[in-house]
Image (cartoon, rainbow, N blue to C red):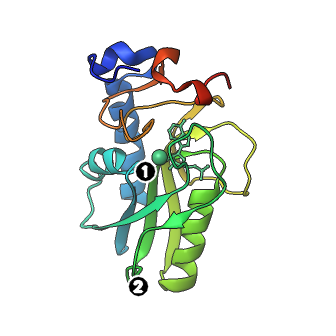
Amino acid sequence: MSTTAPMHDHLDAVLFEEGEILARLDVIAKQITADYRDRDLTVVAILHGGLIMMADLLRRIRLPLKIECISVESYHGGVESSGEVRFNVSEMPDFSGQHVLVIDDILDSGRTLAAITRKIGDECAPESVRTGVLLNKRTERAVEVEADYIGFEIADMFVVGYGLDYQGRYRNLPLIGTLKEEYILPEHRAR
Ligand code: IMP
Ligand code: MG
């Protein structure tokens, strides 16, 4: 597997171009601006995947919001959800009095968003907790959870870009696409 060729050459197909993604974020940001008017809003990015959407979305929201980041991991480098959500934080932020909006790149098995919203609700005393994802994967959830704000629906496939990684790479692709098989390790192929 050569990872040195230009990144776009690694793509098999493009699902959503940058312009489409940003246009969709415009719509969602308007909705969020209306929904959280006159409320204290803290937006929480789930690292690392939620980072790219966070940056583009927040600059479109016309509210004096605060930001936090929470680091978790559930994939551990493969192409399928591992079933375990690890929190890499020593202390959770204090969200008392805050309406919290959790942002992640994708909703897949549901474990990550479910674990985070539960932990924030249990430990951080927020006024409310809602969720937003760029992609909603149409797959069987391991945990029943749906996002409040959704960028796009996708089929049950492995995608990279715009925050989403394979083996830690491709998060900086400004679009969402699928990888050519030659860039996927043999043990992760053929889903
Ligand atoms: P869940 O806990 O199964 O819902 O998984 C959510 C996390 O898995 C996301 O934050 C992503 O980091 C990762 N993930 C799920 N689907 C994909 C994908 O298609 N490509 C890359 N990462 C993914
Ligand atoms: Mg990931």
Amino acid type, label 1 = Gln
Q: Which residue is mark 2?
A: 97
Give the residue at x 33% y 26%.
18
Q: Which quadrant would the N terminus be assigned to in this image?
A: top left
Observer-nearest of 189 and 54? 189
Asked if the residue under mark 2 is in contact with the one under mark 1, i.e. CB atoms within 8 Å, the reply is no
Q: Is mark 2 within 8 Å of ligand 1?
A: no
**In the rendered image, which quarter is residue 47 located in?**
bottom left
Q: Which residue is mark 1?
A: 31
Specify the quarter for ligand 1. top right
Which comes sooner in the sequence, label 1 or label 2? 1
**In the rendered image, which quarter is residue 140 located in?**
top right
Q: CA distance from mark 1 to mark 2?
A: 21 Å
Q: Secondary structure at mark 2?
A: loop
Observer-nearest of 145 and 116? 116
Residue 135 is situated, as x and y percent measured from the top left of the image, at 52, 39
Amino acid type, label 2 = Gly
Give the residue at x 59% y 30%.
188
Observer-nearest of 178 and 17? 178
Q: Secondary structure at mark 1?
A: helix
Q: Nearer the viewer, mark 1 or mark 2?
A: 2
156 to the left or right of 73: right
Give the residue at x 30% y 21%.
7
In the rendered image, the vertical position of residue 62 relative to residue 99, given as above or below: above
Residue 177 is situated, as x and y percent measured from the top left of the image, at 45, 23
